[in-house]
Image (spheres, grey):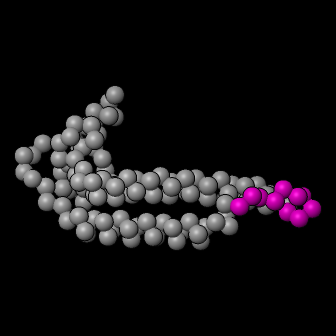
Amino acid sequence: MSNQKININIEKVTTELEKRKTEISDIRAACQQSRDVVELDQSKVGRLSRMDALQSQAMSLESERRRQVELSKIETTLARLQNGNYGYCLRCGEEIQLKRLELDPTVTLCIDCATKKGND
């Protein structure tokens, strides 16, 4: 790790994360109907149409799950920004490289710990 102090623009990161949070909320609202329960009444919808609807619903539910994970990461990151722990590895406590944080502001591990985590 570099001994160089990272220089993080907290306001910029917070603004970007809040903007992404809003985008995700808008997407969630727009996609609500595709997650609704699929009608199984054969007199209303044919078998293949039902299968397509079920597949579409499953994909939509998985997308929603991923959006929820991203929202959770954003909320955790915003809390770390507020309490002054942002930019430090949760495992070893060392500073996370600025380039890594710029690529993904929600990252919680330095590159060394992230690499070790994959080998555990």
The one nearer the camera, 90 or 32, is 90
- In this rendering, would 99 be left or right of 61? left
Q: Quadrant of the N terminus?
A: top left
Tell me if residue 42 is in the magenta stretch.
yes
User: Can you tell which quarter of the image residue 11 is in?
Assistant: bottom left
Q: Is residue 86 visible in this depiction of the protein?
A: no
| 90 or 42: nearer the viewer | 90
- Residue 106: image quadrant is bottom left
* Viewer-nearest residue: 114 or 85: 85
Residue 83 position (above or below residue 12) = above
Which residue does the image show at 84% across and 56% down from the upper left?
A: 40
Task: State the predominant SS element of the stretch in magenta.
Answer: loop
Q: Residue furthest left?
A: 3
Percent x, y of residue 64:
56, 57
- The image position of residue 19, as x and y in percent, is 39, 71
**Residue closest to the far front:** 83
Is residue 49 something that shows in the picture?
A: yes
At x 32% / y 34%, what residue is drawn?
Answer: 117
**How many discs mark residues in the rendered view?**
0
Q: Which residues are magenta?
A: 36-45
- Give above or below for 107 relative to 34: above
Residue 30 left/right relative to 116: right
User: What residue do we see at 24% from left, 60% from top?
Assistant: 102
Residue 23 location in percent, x, y? 46, 70
Nearest the eye: 107 or 18: 18
The percent coordinates of residue 103 (x first, y second) are 27, 58
Can you say which quadrant of the picture contains the C terminus? Answer: top left
Residue occupying image coordinates x 51% and y 55%: 68
Residue 10 painted magenta: no
